[in-house]
Image (tube, grey):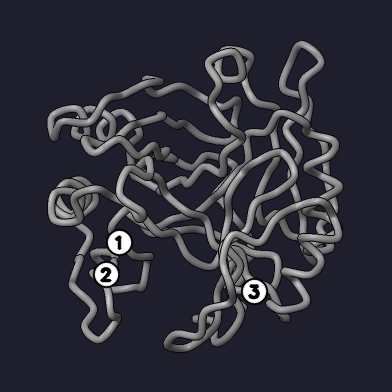
């Protein structure tokens, strides 16, 4: 378990869910992880639901924007990377071939962010912390534990993110498939990159959430109306599986050894 008060630049620090049914999603994830919601008004009758574990914010759930719903965009878990300056990060991403879909903007006093699509098509957010540094607990049951990019071109994605965030990205041998691990410039473990499989799968960042009992967790997913998208896979220090919530958002569960 790791409690956090701040994050070094280049570190995944937050995840939130944009969903078509916010109340139902809150019930699903609360049932799965024991999360408790704190609803924060953000205008026009809309709330941003901070999801807490052990009294600490670990993620959030928000309603999907109408334009996204009308365009057929499925409910999605979003990955945030801490940066020193959202403005400089967005500018640099554009120079490297990314598309800045939402230029840097202030989120009240919480921080400043931008929404970016990398050159291969995956979306991510950059986060310049204000009063909200990110998840106050990671690498634990019901907390952010890993972020993994599915890319149609692992080499090109590795170069883009390495240039943008100064990530150290190295191939991991003995996986049975192409897989690269990510470390921040400070040397801390920070996720992975793999091919988007099967071919044709849209590029995306996959959010992994920790769970004490992954077999029981998958059973709970099904009981609560979700789906198991894979069998439990044993690999390295733990076990993981992909799942889908009742509204259609895909995420992964991880149990095993956690880093501090």
The quadrant where residue 72 appears: top right
| Residue topped by disc 3 | 140
Q: Quadrant of residue 204?
A: top left
Query: Which is more toward the observer, 134 or 29?
Result: 29
78 to 93, vertically: above or below? below
SS for dot 2: loop
Q: Does label 1 or label 2 sit earlier along the sequence?
A: 2
Does the image show residue 205? yes
- The residue at the point 63 percent across, 34 percent down is 18
For marks 3 and 2, the one nearer the N-term is: 3
Task: Please tell me whether mark 3 sits on a helix, a strand or a loop.
Answer: loop
Q: Which mark is nearer the camera, 3 or 2?
A: 2
Q: CA distance from mark 3 to mark 2?
A: 24 Å
Q: Which mark is residue 194?
A: 1
Q: How much space separates mark 1 and mark 2, taking CA atoms? A: 5 Å
Say which residue label 2 marks.
Answer: 179
């Amino acid at each position: 378990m790791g409690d956090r008060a701040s994050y070094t630049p280049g570190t995944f620090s937050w995840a939130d869910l944009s969903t078509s049914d916010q109340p139902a999603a809150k019930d699903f994830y609360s049932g799965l992880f024991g999360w408790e919601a704190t609803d924060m008004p953000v205008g026009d009758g809309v709330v941003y639901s901070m999801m807490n574990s052990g009294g600490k914010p670990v993620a959030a759930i928000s309603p999907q924007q109408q334009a996204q719903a009308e365009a057929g965009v499925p409910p999605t878990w979003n990955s945030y990377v801490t940066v020193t300056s959202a403005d400089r990060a967005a500018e640099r991403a554009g120079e490297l071939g990314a598309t800045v879909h939402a230029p840097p903007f202030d989120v009240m006093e919480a921080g400043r962010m931008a929404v970016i699509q990398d050159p291969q098509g995956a979306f991510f957010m950059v986060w310049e912390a204000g009063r909200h540094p990110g998840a106050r607990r990671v690498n634990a049951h019901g907390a952010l534990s890993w972020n993994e990019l599915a890319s149609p071109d692992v080499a090109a994605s590795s170069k883009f993110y390495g240039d943008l965030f100064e990530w150290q990205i190295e191939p991991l041998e003995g996986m049975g498939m192409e897989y690269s691990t990510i470390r921040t410039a400070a040397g801390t473990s920070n996720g992975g990159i793999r091919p988007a499989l099967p071919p044709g799968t849209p590029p995306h960042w996959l959010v992994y959430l920790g769970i004490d009992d992954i077999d029981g967790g998958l059973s709970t997913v099904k009981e609560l109306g979700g789906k198991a998208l894979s069998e439990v896979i044993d690999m390295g220090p733990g076990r993981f599986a992909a799942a889908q919530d009742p509204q259609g958002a895909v995420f992964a569960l991880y149990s095993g050894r956690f880093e501090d």
